[in-house]
Amino acid sequence: MPPSRFETWLHPTPSGLFCPPGGFYVDPGRPVDRAIVTHGHSDHARPGHDAVLATSETLAVMRMRLGDGAGHAHQSLGYGEKLTIGDVDVTLRPAGHILGSAQVVIEYGGQRAVISGDYKRRADPTCPPFELVTCDLFVTEATFGLPVFRHEPDAREIGRLLHSLATFPERTHLVGVYSLGKCQRLIALLRHAGFGRPIWLHGAMKGACDLYEELGIPLGPLDLVSEAKQSLAGEIVLCPPSALKDRWSRRLADPVTAFASGWMRVRGRARQYGVELPLVISDHVDWPELIATIEATGAGEIWVTHGREEALVHQIGLMGKRGRALALVGLEEEDLE
């Protein structure tokens, strides 16, 4: 296959995607002079950069999680605002993944590239919805880039959780969720479904929940499990996936173990975590949404950054488009988000 016409101004390097005419990297995996960061998950927001450009929410997340490592100089850019960096124009558009998540739109020489970061197409009360941007080059994830991955409607999965809670009022419902984004979204979905009681949190979830509240996302009454004076029978407890099997959960009343993740579509993953109630709730697009998004961008060339790259590249070829797997180091599923 001949070299891509975009590689003169955007190409992968050991540090990540680099834009030479702008002199910046997007989601670099190593410390660099100038970084644009799509969102605050740690496989995209790494420590040690000299200058970081991102949405104000992503910068706040980086400061919370990385402290002094969040970068020496920060510049926020609002959605839809255009900034000229070197010889390119840069705009951030909502990605719908978590609060502050953005697609990076780069325009140079009459061409437009969209680096989507991680994204989802479903409604989320905790962040602005994904905004489709037509482009010549679309850089996409492929976390769930296999036809088997088809996410259930969120309301259906929340309904299953609440039905189980009503059926087993003598048991605690312990739900594994990623602490940044998924936790707050699950809380908001429960509130939307009418669950008004306090939701109990593992201590690791508190910092991100507090930050969401500070940034204007109401979550309702939340309490820490460490402060509970009872076994929390009939209550919902949220914890990191890594804590589902910990001794920490022994204080709870015969817990129903649940896990909210797109990976719960795979029965082997549910068995691996000892999950009794798998909830297929994801912050990424599923296979049909992935294909529909690629088609709707109008892009003739698609680069795939991480996930099930080869299957998606094959599908892109069947769609009459040019596909390329970038295999960037460091972009991985983070704790089964």
Image (cartoon, rainbow, N blue to C red):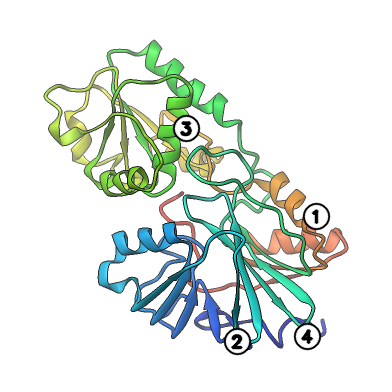
Relative to 88, does residue 171 appear above or below in the rendering? above
Q: Earlier in the sequence, mark 4 or mark 3?
A: 4
Q: Earlier in the sequence, mark 2 or mark 1?
A: 2
The amino acid type, in three-letter code, at marker 4 is: Pro
Q: Which residue is mark 2?
A: 86
Left or right of residue 29: residue 152: right
The nearer-to-camera label among 1 and 3 is: 1
Residue at the spot 28% in from the left edge and 23% down from the top edge: 172
Q: Earlier in the sequence, mark 2 or mark 4?
A: 4
| Cα–Cα gap, marks 3 and 2 | 48 Å
The nearer-to-camera label among 4 and 3 is: 4
Q: Quadrant of the N terminus?
A: bottom right
| Cα–Cα gap, marks 2 and 4 | 24 Å
Q: Secondary structure at mark 4?
A: loop
Is residue 307 visible to us here?
no
Q: Which residue is mark 3?
A: 278
Relative to 322, does residue 282 appear above or below in the rendering? above
Q: Earlier in the sequence, mark 1 or mark 3?
A: 3
Q: Secondary structure at mark 3?
A: strand
The amino acid type, in three-letter code, at marker 3 is: Pro
Relative to 188, does residue 312 appear above or below in the rendering? below
The amino acid type, in three-letter code, at marker 1 is: Glu
Residue at the spot 68% in from the left edge and 85% down from the top edge: 9
The amino acid type, in three-letter code, at marker 2 is: Gly
Q: Which residue is mark 1?
A: 295
The nearer-to-camera label among 2 and 4 is: 2
The nearer-to-camera label among 3 and 2 is: 2
| Cα–Cα gap, marks 1 and 4 | 22 Å
Q: Which residue is mark 4?
A: 3
Left or right of residue 260: residue 144: right
Badge 1 crowding class, 10 Å Cα cut-off, few under 14, some 14 to 19, many 20 or more, is: some
Is residue 76 visible to us here?
yes
